[in-house]
Amino acid sequence: MPLHEKESIRENVLDDIYSSLALSVALPKYKMPEQESSHRNIYQLVHDELMIDGNARQNLATFCQTWVDHEIHKLMDECIDKNMIDKDEYPQTAEIEKRCVHILSDLWHSPESKNPVGCSTTGSSEAAMLGGMALKWAWKEKMNKQGKPTDKPNLVCGPVQVCWHKFARYWEIELREIPMEGERLIMTPEEVIKRCDENTIGVVPTLGVTFTCQYEPVKAINDALDKLQQETGLDIPIHVDAASGGFLAPFCDPDLEWDFRLPRVKSINASGHKYGLSPLGVGWVVWHDADALHKDLIFWVNYLGGNMPTFALNFSRPGGQIVCQYYNFMRLGREGYRKVHQACYDTAQYLADGIEELGCFDILYNGVGGIPGLSWTLKKGIDPGFNLFDLSDRIRSRGWQIAAYAMPANRQDLVIMRILIRHGFSRDIAGILLSDLQHCIDYFSNHPNGQHSDEQESSGFKHS
Ligand SMILES: *Cc1c(COP(=O)(O)O)cnc(C)c1O
């Protein structure tokens, strides 16, 4: 064997990874290399690059799960080859998905929970598309029967998550989104009724509004629509976007009527990967009963063995997230979900009190009556020497991601900061965040007008 080959074998086997020849050059990033490389080296490079991503658990802007227990890691690994669409090959995964739909249907008080109608999705966005399509198809059939045109459907909602803007555009539906006015940051029955007519395919209240974390008043909307029907004959259904609230209210607010207890609620979506506590990639949609899901939307496929109904935008999809949803249901039970979420609510309220005490903020939402989270704005009439965008930027130097953003129409003047408290965010960590916020405020007051600090001071965050 020529000496240079021996050398290269030796290198592959023995060298420290960072002193190896392979890692002495940068990877070609936008073109596929011609040749193979060692898995050990490339793994290390990819692994290292991911280190530059933020620390997910310090991202306080996301609603999504960033902490899962050890067993979930194991189950995800064990399920890596499971395709949930392949119900013939993986009958137990299919069975587990079905059980989850039963559990949710029961949790949300469907009268049909023994024979539920629903499915898993990739998240609430896909689930919202399916719920919205069912509304559109039901409306079209109703209009066709009356011999009326079906070219101008509309959907009434409050300040919604972007998935509803997508739904409206993709399926050519006019979105009648109720703007915020003054102190009113969510929909009210009066504002909903004003926008309803015979072309309204449905009303979508959000249980846990993205911008403010509040629950929209589903029962009051339901009752106002009842009254509208008595007065005008218009029969308008509700789909609840319960992306977060669908996994919170049943445990922490069991008397709140927002679900299938209300007869107008025909379908509900929720994100398993948010307060459902499952890893990223699972959502759910459940219908009140089989009549709420038009049969034309269901496709039957026979090429996977058996004859299987499918209603989803995707075909192949990983099964692990669904299995982990089931694991959580069994592992935690109602008691566990209540305790996990209650701990988050308590921490949100603790943080809201602490942030109020910092002196320069007004708390807009303190974690009561919605999602476990909080939001605040700068106190009016004071000049603390920074705005919330500056603060968001500064707190990032400790790894915290706290979004500062302007409200949607018509309150674009209102800039807030919002934090979501999720499973895995302890009281102890909340204390560290408070002290980091205090340090930021001190920093801004010591360096007015963006004046630069000397090096020693700017190292900041000295916890004495
Ligand atoms: C997160 C969210 C969505 C989108 O859900 P994904 O699971 O991220 O697709 C839709 N609506 C509301 C209210 C949300 O909070």
Image (cartoon, rainbow, N blue to C red):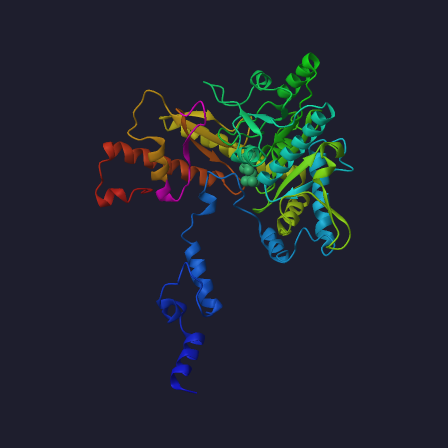
Which residue is at 74% across, 33% downward? 289
Q: Quadrant of residue 369?
A: top right
The majority secondary structure of the magenta stretch comes to: loop
Left-right relation of 382 to 344: left
- Residue 400 in the magenta stretch? The answer is yes
The segment highlighted magenta reads 396-412
Residue 261 in sight: no
> Observer-nearest residue: 343 or 280?
280
Quadrant (top left/top right/bottom left/bottom right) for the N terminus: bottom left
Residue 70, above or below 287: below
Quadrant (top left/top right/bottom left/bottom right) for the C terminus: top left
Residue 299 in sight: yes
Q: Quadrant of residue 44?
A: bottom left
- Residue 253 in the magenta stretch? The answer is no
The percent coordinates of residue 312 (x first, y second) are 65, 43
**Picture quadrant of ligand 1:** top right
Left-right relation of 298 to 382: right
